[in-house]
Image: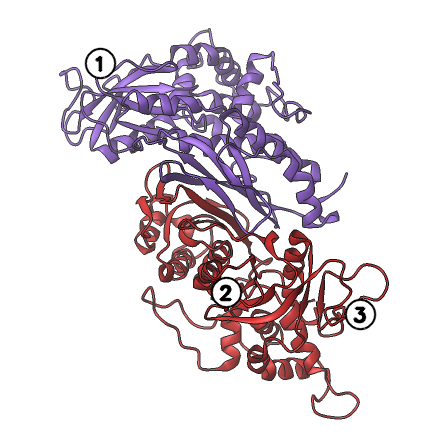
Chain colours: A purple, B red
């Protein structure tokens, strides 16, 4: 094994640079004091996200490749959430000196595989040693003449819609924490762009946690379809929906039965995690585990899937990949059905589920504690 | 003292955001998934740099404000070195939970004070906890229709010129390490834009180390004056000149007597550091310390001043703030004066001083070890 400290920065860069995609908007790539990128409509979109070892990933579960995929995915999703096309990212990497150089080249391959499908480049970076792994990515995008879709544009009467998967990342993490699936899942693919086929359904959930795949094209499609507000789901559906509600001055009511396909995909994992956690036999008697409660926790509370949540004018035709999951209400309306829902006296909660205040019960954050 | 862990991320952002300058190119500032910036000529320049505690700064010497100033300065200098005007930066910050919130707000003020003089904005960021302080900044710039000035454009016959101070950062660090000046130097200025006046000459050198002030306007001026190559001096004059030489396929000969004003400013510190290091009485007998050797070490070997080094066609009028410090030679020429210099047999060194191969003697990296 070659460790980072055994090589000079130049030697490490010699191994990384050939792995990185150039990107179609790149006018000048790595190697000078700065890169130069095209911004054809005279504007660009920029966002930054940092991943820290033992906070955002665990090195015993995530390979360098996984961390690169995740770093790319969550940054690219921020660009998609503005209704823009990702063009290029730059990366600052802090690594302990005893890190295997393969971890670093794996990271570069993961960034490359995350960028390539959308034509984004990896155009620069910085490398330093430090006490733990830190990956900071800054990503750029092109609005192609569109107005950016902000969090603040939702209006009462709008439909709330979702693209991507929801709850998979939380389920994958729960499976890892319960020891039901082992990670790392597989070695770094040998070829950039390789398709890793995971046959096992639980492994697909773990993969969704380790290497999320945001619906990047859905952001531009939503903007073109007239989305009034949009964001990337990173901190859980309830919390992120609350951010649209707060920025737009509205309330959001989510459908209790939304995400039926995700529930189906997650059910077997929810059952297994509940049993492993000692919640009892899921099908039997008074000690019966609340599988639906676990599912609700993952669907409404789980973060890091990096799907997109948007609002569309009522009657708008939702683009491919988007499903209606709720509606926008006026801030002072007590409930969408006129029956008052859970609001009762005082301020109505900013986000409700089927008109009710969300129940944060057992199984909610239980498996993440 | 309020610690970072005592506040939520929202509460910390509430304290940081009002401190940050918006910037004249900012179309949409912080608060959404991404910021939107103007790129009037249809291109933008981007660079990233990371600072890690105990690698790039020491928390016992550098306040949060100092680190913010330094992070801004070294990033902005990368933009200037392309011949571009800085427009905006984004920052990822990793902090231990027991960090004083004042350190974080000080960092924001330092970033703001670094950005404001050039009209750049601080338009976004990310915040995470981690085992040590890490500050990753990505900075953007506007070429205003100019061609970027690369490292690869130097041609034999060009003049090598410099803007900024050289050797001050290395001298400041040596003064700190010898215990001759104490840091932190002063509290964070209460007002953004405050001018901290340091009366003591040695404190000015320490300030140059803790809060470098690159000659940001000199980059655009050099581009307009026809600079053929340019870079930011971060790793020492010899090493960085070698980068222009390598990228351009040329040799560079620096004048042995260059930087007279910097030598004058550094002489008293060099004498004091030499005495403190036990190099003997600087003025006396055979144990006499080699003050000029120490000065050469700082001038030719010292990094982190973030001045600019550029090449101009022979006969070009150097813009204000630039001084000639050497000349560009053909790769195969043995010496600029026809006398052969230090090249002798074999390959000529890429960078020479007065035609001689640089002597890396005592006093070179001695005080940094």
Q: Quadrant of residue A65?
A: top right
In x, y percent, where is residue B314? 58, 66
Local secondary structure at mark 2: loop
Using the image, tell me which numbered label, if any, was put on residue B340. Answer: 3
- N-terminal of the pair, mark 2 or mark 3, is 2
Q: Residue pushed farthest bottom?
A: B284
Q: Nearer the viewer, mark 3 or mark 1?
A: 3
Q: Is disc 3 in contact with disc 1, using a CB cutoff of under 8 Å?
A: no
Using the image, tell me which numbered label, if any, was put on residue B317. Answer: none
Classed neighbour count for the residue bearing mark 2: other residues with Cα under 10 Å, few (<14), some (14–19), many (≥20): many
* Residues at marks 3 and 1, CA–CA distance in whole angstroms: 82 Å
Which chain is disc 2 placed on?
B
In the image, B84: left or right of A70? left
Local secondary structure at mark 1: loop
Q: Residue pushed farthest right?
A: B345
Which chain is disc 3 placed on?
B
In x, y percent, where is residue B105? 38, 57
Work out which quarter of the rendered image holds the N terminus of chain A and state it. top right
Write down the residue under mark 1. Answer: A315
In x, y percent, where is residue A36? 49, 44
Judge by depth and name the residue closer to the eye, A292 or B38.
B38
Image height check: is A148 above or below A196? below
Marks 3 and 1 share the same chain: no
Q: Nearer the viewer, mark 2 or mark 3?
A: 3
Local secondary structure at mark 3: loop
Image height check: is B105 above or below B44? below
In x, y percent, where is residue B242? 67, 59
Write down the residue under mark 2. Answer: B62
Judge by depth and name the residue closer to the eye, B214 or A266.
B214
* Residues at marks 2 and 3, CA–CA distance in whole angstroms: 46 Å
Which chain is disc 1 placed on?
A
């Amino acid at each position: 094994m070659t460790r980072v400290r055994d090589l000079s920065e130049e030697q490490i860069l010699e191994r990384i640079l050939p792995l990185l995609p150039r990107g179609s908007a790149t006018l000048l790539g790595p190697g000078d004091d700065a890169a130069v990128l095209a911004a054809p409509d005279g504007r660009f979109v920029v966002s930054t996200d940092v991943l820290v070892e033992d906070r955002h990933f665990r090195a015993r579960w995530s390979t360098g490749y996984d961390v690169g995929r995740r770093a790319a995915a969550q940054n690219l999703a921020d660009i998609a959430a503005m209704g823009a096309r990702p063009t290029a990212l730059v990366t600052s990497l802090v690594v302990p000196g005893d890190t295997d150089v393969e971890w670093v080249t794996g990271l570069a391959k993961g960034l490359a595989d995350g960028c390539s499908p959308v034509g984004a480049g990896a155009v620069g970076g910085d490398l330093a040693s430090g006490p733990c792994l830190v990956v900071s990515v800054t990503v750029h995008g092109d609005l192609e003449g569109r107005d950016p879709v902000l969090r603040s544009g939702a209006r009462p009467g709008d439909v709330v819609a979702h693209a991507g998967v929801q709850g998979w990342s939380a389920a994958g993490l729960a499976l890892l924490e319960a020891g039901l699936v082992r990670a790392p899942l597989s070695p770094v693919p040998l070829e950039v762009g390789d398709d890793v086929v995971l046959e096992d359904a639980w492994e697909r959930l773990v993969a969704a946690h380790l290497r999320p795949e945001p619906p990047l094209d859905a952001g531009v499609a939503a903007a073109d379809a007239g989305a009034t507000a949009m964001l990337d789901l990173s901190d859980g559906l309830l919390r992120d929906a609350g951010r649209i509600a707060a920025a737009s001055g509205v309330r959001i009511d989510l459908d209790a039965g939304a995400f039926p396909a995700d529930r189906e995909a997650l059910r077997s994992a929810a059952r297994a995690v509940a049993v492993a956690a000692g919640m009892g036999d899921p099908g039997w008697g008074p000690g019966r585990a609340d599988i639906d409660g676990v599912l609700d926790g993952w669907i409404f509370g789980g973060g890091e899937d990096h799907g997109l949540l948007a609002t569309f004018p009522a009657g708008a035709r939702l683009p491919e990949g988007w499903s209606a999951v709720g509606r926008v209400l006026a801030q002072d309306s007590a409930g969408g059905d006129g029956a008052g829902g859970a609001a009762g006296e005082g301020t109505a909660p900013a986000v409700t589920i089927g008109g009710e205040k969300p129940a944060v019960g057992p199984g909610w954050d239980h498996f993440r504690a």
